Image (spheres, helix red, strand yellow):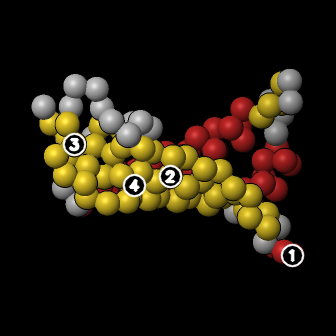
Amino acid sequence: MLLTTTSTVEGMHVHQYLGLVEGEAILGANVFKDFFASITDIVGGRSAAYEEELRKAKQIAMQEMIAEAQRRGANAIIGIDIDYESISGGGSGNMLMVSVSGTAVVVGQ
């Protein structure tokens, strides 16, 4: 599966547009508590453990999007957008959502 943030692929033509595909992953409040309680690798204001969890969430969201594109018969996703959003859960704490979207297409020479 070819993945790109651009709307075109150099040297290839879009033969068919198959529509918007999306994927999401949400990290719950308990994840934040666990990380803030156990983070010992903060260097320069960054947490490698927390960043790793965000990478995992992004990977889950990307895999969901790719699976949807494959179900539609796509061989590429163009115009990919990745968003991170904090969601207030009121009394239950905050959650972090990673969402990805793009256009499923069939590309070729």
Q: Which residue is mark 1?
A: 91
Q: Which residue is mark 2?
A: 100
Mark 3 and mark 2 lie on one chain; the one further toward the N terminus is 3
Secondary structure under the numbered disc 4 in the rendered image? helix
Is residue 20 depicted above or below 77 in this figure? below
Name the residue located 12 percent from the left edge and 31 percent from the top edge: 109
- Residues at discs 4 and 2 in contact (Cβ within 8 Å): yes
Q: Which mark is residue 65?
A: 4
Number of other residues with Cα within 10 Å of mark 4, as a class: few under 14, some 14 to 19, many 20 or more: many
Distance (Cα) linking label 1 and label 2: 27 Å
Mark 4 and mark 3 lie on one chain; the one further toward the N terminus is 3
- Quick check: 24 left or right of 18? right
Secondary structure under the numbered disc 3 in the rendered image? strand
Question: Mark 3 belongs to which amino acid?
Answer: Val
Secondary structure under the numbered disc 1 in the rendered image? helix
Counting from the top left corner in percent of width and height, residue 74 is at: 22, 51
- Quick check: 11 left or right of 37? left
Q: Which mark is residue 14?
A: 3
Name the residue located 44 percent from the left edge and 59 percent from the top edge: 22
Name the residue located 41 percent from the left edge and 51 percent from the top edge: 102
Question: Mark 1 belongs to which amino acid?
Answer: Gly
Distance (Cα) linking label 4 and label 1: 31 Å
